[in-house]
Protein backbone atom coordinates (compact mmCIF):
# COMPACT_ATOMS: atom_id res chain seq x y z
CA UNK A 1 0.00 0.00 0.00
CA UNK A 2 2.53 2.57 -0.99
CA UNK A 3 2.45 5.27 -3.54
CA UNK A 4 5.69 6.32 -5.15
CA UNK A 5 4.71 9.97 -4.93
CA UNK A 6 4.39 9.93 -1.14
CA UNK A 7 6.66 8.94 1.66
CA UNK A 8 4.42 7.94 4.51
CA UNK A 9 6.15 8.31 7.86
CA UNK A 10 6.13 5.10 9.84
CA UNK A 11 7.08 6.56 13.19
CA UNK A 12 6.22 5.15 16.60
CA UNK A 13 2.80 6.81 16.77
CA UNK A 14 1.86 5.09 13.52
CA UNK A 15 2.73 1.60 14.80
CA UNK A 16 0.12 -0.97 15.81
CA UNK A 17 -1.82 -0.67 19.07
CA UNK A 18 0.63 -2.97 20.86
CA UNK A 19 3.68 -1.88 18.88
CA UNK A 20 3.38 -4.99 16.74
CA UNK A 21 2.27 -5.84 13.23
CA UNK A 22 2.37 -3.54 10.23
CA UNK A 23 2.32 0.24 10.67
CA UNK A 24 -1.16 1.65 11.10
CA UNK A 25 -1.61 4.09 8.22
CA UNK A 26 -5.35 4.36 8.54
CA UNK A 27 -7.59 5.24 11.44
CA UNK A 28 -10.28 2.55 11.14
CA UNK A 29 -12.45 4.02 13.92
CA UNK A 30 -12.55 7.34 12.08
CA UNK A 31 -13.30 5.46 8.85
CA UNK A 32 -16.26 3.78 10.54
CA UNK A 33 -17.55 7.17 11.74
CA UNK A 34 -17.17 8.68 8.28
CA UNK A 35 -19.01 5.75 6.67
CA UNK A 36 -21.81 5.92 9.23
CA UNK A 37 -22.15 9.67 8.69
CA UNK A 38 -22.31 9.13 4.93
CA UNK A 39 -24.87 6.31 5.19
CA UNK A 40 -27.99 8.53 5.06
CA UNK A 41 -27.37 10.00 1.62
CA UNK A 42 -24.98 7.34 0.33
CA UNK A 43 -27.33 6.20 -2.45
CA UNK A 44 -27.08 9.62 -4.10
CA UNK A 45 -23.28 9.58 -4.21
CA UNK A 46 -22.36 5.95 -4.78
CA UNK A 47 -21.70 6.02 -8.55
CA UNK A 48 -18.21 4.56 -8.09
CA UNK A 49 -19.47 1.79 -5.82
CA UNK A 50 -22.34 1.01 -8.20
CA UNK A 51 -19.93 0.81 -11.15
CA UNK A 52 -17.49 -1.42 -9.25
CA UNK A 53 -20.37 -3.65 -8.08
CA UNK A 54 -21.67 -4.14 -11.62
CA UNK A 55 -18.17 -5.05 -12.82
CA UNK A 56 -17.75 -7.55 -9.97
CA UNK A 57 -21.05 -9.17 -10.91
CA UNK A 58 -20.03 -9.32 -14.59
CA UNK A 59 -16.91 -11.15 -13.50
CA UNK A 60 -18.94 -13.69 -11.52
CA UNK A 61 -21.33 -14.18 -14.44
CA UNK A 62 -18.37 -15.42 -16.51
CA UNK A 63 -17.65 -18.20 -13.98
CA UNK A 64 -19.47 -21.40 -14.89
CA UNK A 65 -20.32 -22.73 -11.46
CA UNK A 66 -22.62 -21.98 -8.52
CA UNK A 67 -21.56 -20.72 -5.08
CA UNK A 68 -23.56 -21.64 -1.98
CA UNK A 69 -22.45 -18.88 0.40
CA UNK A 70 -21.49 -15.43 -0.89
CA UNK A 71 -19.84 -12.90 1.41
CA UNK A 72 -19.94 -9.29 0.20
CA UNK A 73 -17.59 -6.77 1.79
CA UNK A 74 -18.30 -3.04 1.55
CA UNK A 75 -20.04 -1.22 -1.24
CA UNK A 76 -22.71 0.17 1.09
CA UNK A 77 -25.41 -2.08 -0.39
CA UNK A 78 -24.36 -1.44 -4.01
CA UNK A 79 -23.57 -5.12 -4.64
CA UNK A 80 -26.93 -6.29 -3.29
CA UNK A 81 -28.78 -3.76 -5.42
CA UNK A 82 -26.75 -4.72 -8.49
CA UNK A 83 -27.51 -8.41 -7.81
CA UNK A 84 -31.25 -7.68 -7.75
CA UNK A 85 -30.90 -6.47 -11.35
CA UNK A 86 -28.99 -9.60 -12.39
CA UNK A 87 -31.09 -12.66 -11.51
CA UNK A 88 -28.78 -14.77 -13.72
CA UNK A 89 -25.93 -14.09 -11.25
CA UNK A 90 -28.07 -13.94 -8.08
CA UNK A 91 -29.29 -17.43 -9.03
CA UNK A 92 -25.75 -18.76 -8.67
CA UNK A 93 -25.79 -17.97 -4.94
CA UNK A 94 -27.53 -19.89 -2.18
CA UNK A 95 -26.99 -17.30 0.56
CA UNK A 96 -25.78 -13.71 0.28
CA UNK A 97 -24.30 -11.90 3.27
CA UNK A 98 -23.63 -8.18 2.89
CA UNK A 99 -21.05 -6.96 5.39
CA UNK A 100 -19.75 -3.48 6.09
CA UNK A 101 -17.61 -1.76 8.70
CA UNK A 102 -20.37 0.78 9.31
CA UNK A 103 -23.68 -0.29 10.81
CA UNK A 104 -25.44 2.54 9.01
CA UNK A 105 -24.50 0.93 5.70
CA UNK A 106 -24.89 -2.74 6.78
CA UNK A 107 -28.50 -2.16 7.84
CA UNK A 108 -29.43 -1.01 4.32
CA UNK A 109 -28.34 -4.32 2.79
CA UNK A 110 -30.71 -6.15 0.49
CA UNK A 111 -29.67 -9.53 1.87
CA UNK A 112 -28.36 -10.66 5.30
CA UNK A 113 -26.59 -7.73 6.98
CA UNK A 114 -23.40 -8.02 9.02
CA UNK A 115 -20.97 -5.55 10.60
CA UNK A 116 -17.32 -6.58 10.54
CA UNK A 117 -13.81 -5.25 10.25
CA UNK A 118 -11.86 -6.74 7.34
CA UNK A 119 -8.71 -6.51 9.48
CA UNK A 120 -10.25 -8.89 12.04
CA UNK A 121 -12.45 -11.08 9.94
CA UNK A 122 -15.02 -12.92 12.11
CA UNK A 123 -15.56 -15.66 9.53
CA UNK A 124 -14.78 -19.32 10.21
CA UNK A 125 -12.15 -21.03 8.07
CA UNK A 126 -13.38 -22.64 4.86
CA UNK A 127 -16.96 -21.51 5.44
CA UNK A 128 -17.82 -19.37 2.39
CA UNK A 129 -17.67 -20.10 -1.34
CA UNK A 130 -17.21 -16.65 -2.82
CA UNK A 131 -16.11 -13.25 -1.52
CA UNK A 132 -16.91 -10.03 -3.40
CA UNK A 133 -15.17 -6.94 -2.06
CA UNK A 134 -16.51 -3.61 -3.34
CA UNK A 135 -14.21 -0.62 -2.71
CA UNK A 136 -13.42 -1.51 0.89
CA UNK A 137 -9.93 -3.02 0.96
CA UNK A 138 -8.01 0.18 0.09
CA UNK A 139 -8.60 1.31 3.69
CA UNK A 140 -6.93 -1.73 5.28
CA UNK A 141 -3.60 -1.18 7.03
CA UNK A 142 -2.37 -4.59 5.90
CA UNK A 143 -3.84 -5.45 2.51
CA UNK A 144 -2.00 -8.78 2.15
CA UNK A 145 -3.04 -9.73 5.70
CA UNK A 146 -6.68 -8.97 4.88
CA UNK A 147 -6.45 -11.01 1.66
CA UNK A 148 -4.90 -13.93 3.58
CA UNK A 149 -7.80 -13.88 6.05
CA UNK A 150 -10.28 -13.90 3.15
CA UNK A 151 -8.42 -16.75 1.48
CA UNK A 152 -8.70 -18.78 4.71
CA UNK A 153 -12.42 -18.02 4.97
CA UNK A 154 -12.95 -19.49 1.50
CA UNK A 155 -13.54 -23.18 0.92
CA UNK A 156 -10.96 -24.82 -1.35
CA UNK A 157 -11.61 -23.69 -4.93
CA UNK A 158 -13.61 -20.71 -3.59
CA UNK A 159 -13.50 -17.50 -5.62
CA UNK A 160 -12.47 -13.99 -4.63
CA UNK A 161 -13.17 -10.90 -6.73
CA UNK A 162 -12.38 -7.46 -5.37
CA UNK A 163 -12.36 -3.85 -6.49
CA UNK A 164 -10.30 -1.21 -4.73
CA UNK A 165 -9.09 2.28 -5.47
CA UNK A 166 -5.59 2.44 -6.96
CA UNK A 167 -2.63 4.80 -7.01
CA UNK A 168 -3.76 7.24 -9.70
CA UNK A 169 -6.98 7.97 -7.86
CA UNK A 170 -7.45 11.71 -7.24
CA UNK A 171 -4.07 12.50 -8.75
CA UNK A 172 -5.27 15.99 -9.79
CA UNK A 173 -6.52 16.80 -6.28
CA UNK A 174 -3.31 15.48 -4.75
CA UNK A 175 -1.14 17.62 -7.02
CA UNK A 176 -3.27 20.74 -6.48
CA UNK A 177 -3.27 20.36 -2.69
CA UNK A 178 0.48 19.83 -2.63
CA UNK A 179 1.07 22.90 -4.77
CA UNK A 180 -1.27 25.02 -2.62
CA UNK A 181 0.26 23.84 0.64
CA UNK A 182 3.79 24.30 -0.63
CA UNK A 183 2.90 27.87 -1.64
CA UNK A 184 1.12 28.81 1.58
CA UNK A 185 3.04 26.85 4.20
CA UNK A 186 6.37 26.19 2.54
CA UNK A 187 6.02 22.40 2.92
CA UNK A 188 3.66 19.57 2.14
CA UNK A 189 1.90 16.83 4.08
CA UNK A 190 -0.08 13.81 2.96
CA UNK A 191 -3.72 14.85 2.70
CA UNK A 192 -4.90 12.29 0.19
CA UNK A 193 -4.72 8.62 1.11
CA UNK A 194 -2.07 6.43 -0.51
CA UNK A 195 -3.50 3.59 -2.60
CA UNK A 196 -2.19 0.27 -3.89
CA UNK A 197 -0.18 0.48 -7.09
CA UNK A 198 -1.76 -1.12 -10.12
CA UNK A 199 1.22 -3.27 -10.87
CA UNK A 200 1.15 -4.82 -7.40
CA UNK A 201 -2.32 -6.34 -7.29
CA UNK A 202 -1.84 -9.75 -8.94
CA UNK A 203 1.42 -10.08 -6.99
CA UNK A 204 -0.31 -9.23 -3.71
CA UNK A 205 -2.98 -11.82 -4.50
CA UNK A 206 -0.29 -14.44 -5.12
CA UNK A 207 1.45 -13.49 -1.86
CA UNK A 208 -1.87 -13.99 -0.08
CA UNK A 209 -1.94 -17.55 -1.45
CA UNK A 210 -4.55 -17.16 -4.18
CA UNK A 211 -4.23 -19.42 -7.21
CA UNK A 212 -4.50 -18.06 -10.74
CA UNK A 213 -4.56 -14.40 -9.67
CA UNK A 214 -5.51 -11.78 -12.23
CA UNK A 215 -5.89 -8.03 -12.07
CA UNK A 216 -6.96 -5.22 -14.34
CA UNK A 217 -7.73 -1.53 -14.14
CA UNK A 218 -10.85 0.53 -14.74
CA UNK A 219 -10.07 4.25 -15.02
CA UNK A 220 -12.99 6.56 -14.48
CA UNK A 221 -12.91 10.32 -15.01
CA UNK A 222 -15.67 12.20 -13.26
CA UNK A 223 -16.27 15.89 -13.95
CA UNK A 224 -17.05 18.46 -11.29
CA UNK A 225 -17.78 22.19 -11.19
CA UNK A 226 -14.83 22.78 -8.89
CA UNK A 227 -12.77 21.04 -6.21
CA UNK A 228 -15.20 22.09 -3.46
CA UNK A 229 -17.91 20.03 -5.12
CA UNK A 230 -15.49 17.12 -5.58
CA UNK A 231 -14.52 17.18 -1.90
CA UNK A 232 -18.18 17.37 -0.82
CA UNK A 233 -18.88 14.27 -2.93
CA UNK A 234 -15.92 12.43 -1.38
CA UNK A 235 -17.34 13.20 2.07
CA UNK A 236 -20.78 11.98 1.02
CA UNK A 237 -19.18 8.74 -0.21
CA UNK A 238 -17.37 8.39 3.12
CA UNK A 239 -14.11 8.32 1.17
CA UNK A 240 -12.20 11.27 2.62
CA UNK A 241 -8.73 10.58 3.98
CA UNK A 242 -8.45 8.78 7.32
CA UNK A 243 -4.65 8.81 7.39
CA UNK A 244 -3.40 8.49 10.95
CA UNK A 245 -0.66 10.97 10.25
CA UNK A 246 -2.92 13.50 8.57
CA UNK A 247 -2.26 17.05 9.74
CA UNK A 248 -4.12 17.78 12.99
CA UNK A 249 -4.32 21.54 12.76
CA UNK A 250 -7.35 22.72 10.82
CA UNK A 251 -6.52 23.97 7.36
CA UNK A 252 -7.36 27.50 6.45
CA UNK A 253 -10.08 28.47 4.03
CA UNK A 254 -7.32 30.09 1.99
CA UNK A 255 -5.78 26.63 1.47
CA UNK A 256 -8.95 25.22 -0.06
CA UNK A 257 -9.50 28.34 -2.19
CA UNK A 258 -5.94 28.16 -3.50
CA UNK A 259 -6.30 24.40 -4.13
CA UNK A 260 -9.43 25.08 -6.18
CA UNK A 261 -7.64 27.81 -8.16
CA UNK A 262 -4.64 25.60 -8.93
CA UNK A 263 -6.90 22.64 -9.80
CA UNK A 264 -8.78 24.77 -12.34
CA UNK A 265 -5.64 26.38 -13.76
CA UNK A 266 -3.86 23.08 -14.28
CA UNK A 267 -6.65 20.67 -15.19
CA UNK A 268 -9.92 22.43 -16.17
CA UNK A 269 -11.56 21.50 -19.46
CA UNK A 270 -12.67 24.18 -21.93
CA UNK A 271 -16.09 24.43 -20.33
CA UNK A 272 -14.47 25.18 -16.96
CA UNK A 273 -15.30 21.80 -15.40
CA UNK A 274 -12.53 19.89 -13.67
CA UNK A 275 -11.76 16.20 -14.15
CA UNK A 276 -11.15 13.83 -11.23
CA UNK A 277 -9.50 10.49 -11.94
CA UNK A 278 -10.61 7.38 -10.08
CA UNK A 279 -8.60 4.24 -10.71
CA UNK A 280 -10.51 1.11 -9.78
CA UNK A 281 -8.24 -1.94 -9.49
CA UNK A 282 -9.95 -5.26 -10.01
CA UNK A 283 -8.34 -8.42 -8.70
CA UNK A 284 -9.58 -12.00 -8.69
CA UNK A 285 -8.23 -15.37 -7.68
CA UNK A 286 -9.10 -18.79 -6.34
CA UNK A 287 -8.54 -20.43 -2.97
CA UNK A 288 -6.11 -23.28 -3.74
CA UNK A 289 -7.46 -26.73 -4.55
CA UNK A 290 -5.47 -29.79 -5.71
CA UNK A 291 -7.49 -30.11 -8.92
CA UNK A 292 -6.65 -26.63 -10.16
CA UNK A 293 -4.30 -26.28 -13.12
CA UNK A 294 -0.73 -25.56 -12.06
CA UNK A 295 2.27 -24.42 -14.07
CA UNK A 296 4.51 -27.38 -14.98
CA UNK A 297 8.09 -27.58 -13.74
CA UNK A 298 10.61 -25.98 -16.14
CA UNK A 299 12.16 -28.64 -18.38
CA UNK A 300 9.27 -31.08 -17.91
CA UNK A 301 7.88 -30.59 -21.44
CA UNK A 302 7.77 -33.69 -23.70
CA UNK A 303 6.95 -31.84 -26.92
CA UNK A 304 9.02 -29.07 -28.49
CA UNK A 305 7.24 -25.72 -28.70
CA UNK A 306 8.51 -25.30 -32.27
CA UNK A 307 6.80 -28.57 -33.28
CA UNK A 308 3.56 -27.54 -31.61
CA UNK A 309 3.66 -24.25 -33.53
CA UNK A 310 4.79 -25.93 -36.75
CA UNK A 311 7.84 -23.64 -37.19
CA UNK A 312 11.62 -24.10 -37.30
CA UNK A 313 13.38 -23.69 -33.98
CA UNK A 314 16.01 -20.93 -33.96
CA UNK A 315 18.76 -20.23 -31.52
CA UNK A 316 18.21 -17.18 -29.36
CA UNK A 317 21.21 -15.52 -30.96
CA UNK A 318 19.79 -15.84 -34.46
CA UNK A 319 17.78 -12.99 -35.90
CA UNK A 320 14.52 -13.73 -37.65
CA UNK A 321 15.10 -13.85 -41.38
CA UNK A 322 18.75 -14.95 -41.08
CA UNK B 1 -50.01 2.23 18.30
CA UNK B 2 -47.79 0.04 20.40
CA UNK B 3 -48.43 -3.07 18.35
CA UNK B 4 -47.84 -1.54 14.92
CA UNK B 5 -45.21 -3.15 12.76
CA UNK B 6 -42.19 -1.25 11.61
CA UNK B 7 -42.78 -0.79 7.87
CA UNK B 8 -39.02 -0.78 7.25
CA UNK B 9 -38.84 -4.44 8.26
CA UNK B 10 -38.84 -6.50 5.11
CA UNK B 11 -40.31 -9.98 5.04
CA UNK B 12 -37.04 -11.82 4.55
CA UNK B 13 -35.21 -9.82 7.22
CA UNK B 14 -35.36 -11.40 10.69
CA UNK B 15 -36.98 -9.10 13.26
CA UNK B 16 -35.32 -7.60 16.33
CA UNK B 17 -32.40 -9.72 17.47
CA UNK B 18 -33.19 -12.83 15.41
CA UNK B 19 -30.11 -13.85 13.53
CA UNK B 20 -30.12 -15.74 10.28
CA UNK B 21 -28.99 -19.37 10.85
CA UNK B 22 -26.51 -19.11 7.97
CA UNK B 23 -24.73 -16.25 9.73
CA UNK B 24 -24.54 -18.23 12.97
CA UNK B 25 -22.96 -21.07 11.01
CA UNK B 26 -20.05 -19.03 9.63
CA UNK B 27 -19.33 -16.44 12.36
CA UNK B 28 -16.46 -16.75 14.83
CA UNK B 29 -15.06 -14.33 17.42
CA UNK B 30 -12.89 -11.73 15.62
CA UNK B 31 -10.50 -11.58 18.59
CA UNK B 32 -9.90 -15.27 19.42
CA UNK B 33 -11.45 -16.93 16.35
CA UNK B 34 -13.27 -19.12 18.87
CA UNK B 35 -16.89 -20.27 18.63
CA UNK B 36 -19.84 -18.05 19.56
CA UNK B 37 -22.94 -18.79 21.62
CA UNK B 38 -26.18 -17.22 20.48
CA UNK B 39 -28.10 -15.67 23.39
CA UNK B 40 -31.50 -15.15 21.80
CA UNK B 41 -32.99 -13.48 24.90
CA UNK B 42 -30.26 -10.89 25.22
CA UNK B 43 -29.75 -10.54 21.49
CA UNK B 44 -26.05 -11.18 21.76
CA UNK B 45 -23.37 -13.43 20.35
CA UNK B 46 -21.16 -14.50 23.22
CA UNK B 47 -17.49 -15.32 22.92
CA UNK B 48 -16.44 -17.09 26.15
CA UNK B 49 -12.83 -17.23 24.99
CA UNK B 50 -12.62 -13.44 24.60
CA UNK B 51 -15.02 -12.61 27.43
CA UNK B 52 -17.07 -10.48 25.06
CA UNK B 53 -20.71 -10.29 24.01
CA UNK B 54 -21.29 -8.91 20.52
CA UNK B 55 -24.60 -7.07 20.11
CA UNK B 56 -27.19 -7.88 17.46
CA UNK B 57 -29.06 -4.82 16.24
CA UNK B 58 -32.05 -5.20 13.89
CA UNK B 59 -30.88 -8.71 13.04
CA UNK B 60 -27.40 -7.44 12.15
CA UNK B 61 -24.56 -8.91 14.26
CA UNK B 62 -22.01 -6.20 15.15
CA UNK B 63 -18.74 -8.15 15.16
CA UNK B 64 -16.53 -5.31 16.41
CA UNK B 65 -14.64 -5.78 19.70
CA UNK B 66 -14.94 -2.06 20.51
CA UNK B 67 -18.74 -2.31 20.41
CA UNK B 68 -18.94 -5.55 22.40
CA UNK B 69 -19.94 -5.82 26.07
CA UNK B 70 -17.36 -7.26 28.43
CA UNK B 71 -18.64 -10.32 30.28
CA UNK B 72 -18.56 -9.70 34.03
CA UNK B 73 -18.11 -13.32 35.20
Image (cartoon, coloured by chain):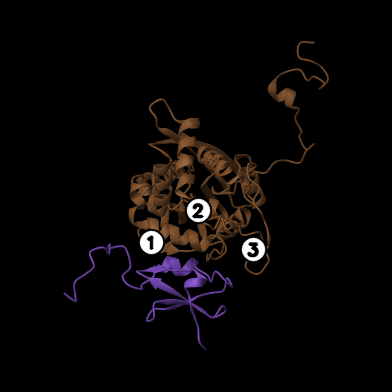
Chain colours: A brown, B purple
What residue is pinned by disc 3? A13
Q: What distance separates the C-alpha of mark 3 from that of mark 1?
A: 30 Å
- Which numbered tag is attached to residue A130? 2
What residue is pinned by disc 1? A104
Indicate the secondary structure of the residue bearing disc 3: helix
Q: What distance separates the C-alpha of mark 1 from that of mark 2?
A: 24 Å
Q: Residue at x 73, y 23 (%)?
A: A307
Q: Nearer the viewer, residue A153 or A101?
A: A101
Look at the image and tell me in which quarter the C terminus of chain A lies: top right
- Give the mark, 1 or 2, whose residue is nearer the N terminus: 1
Q: Nearer the viewer, residue A312 or A51?
A: A51
Q: Nearer the viewer, residue A200 or A12?
A: A12
Residue A258 seen: yes
For mark 3, name the chain: A
Give the mark toward the camera: 1 or 2.
1
Q: Residues within 10 Å of mark 3 (few under 14, many from 20)?
A: some
Give the mark toward the camera: 3 or 2.
3
Count of residue discs: 3
Q: Residue at x 57, y 71 (%)?
A: B31
> Where B48 sits versus A51, above or below?
below
Residue farthest to the left? Answer: B1
Residue farthest to the bottom? Answer: B73
Marks 1, 2 in one chain: yes
Find residue B16 and report its image quarter. Answer: bottom left
- Give the mark, 3 or 2, whose residue is nearer the N terminus: 3
For mark 1, name the chain: A
Q: Residue at x 67, y 44 (%)?
A: A294
- Give the mark, 3 or 1, whose residue is nearer the N terminus: 3
Q: Nearer the viewer, residue A79 or A294?
A: A79
Amino acid sequence: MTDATHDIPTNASAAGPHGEGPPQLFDRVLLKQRKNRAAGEFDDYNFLHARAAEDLIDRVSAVTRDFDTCLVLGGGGAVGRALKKRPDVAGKFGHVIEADLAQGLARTSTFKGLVLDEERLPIAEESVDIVLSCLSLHWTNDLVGALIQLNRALRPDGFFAGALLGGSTLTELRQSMMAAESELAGGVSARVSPFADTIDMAGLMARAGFAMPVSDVDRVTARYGNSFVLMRDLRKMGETSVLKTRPREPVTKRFFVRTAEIYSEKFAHEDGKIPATFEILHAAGWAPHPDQPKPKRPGSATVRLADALGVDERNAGQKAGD
Amino acid sequence: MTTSQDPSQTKDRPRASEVDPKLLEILVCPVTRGTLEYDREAGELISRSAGLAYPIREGVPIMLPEEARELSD
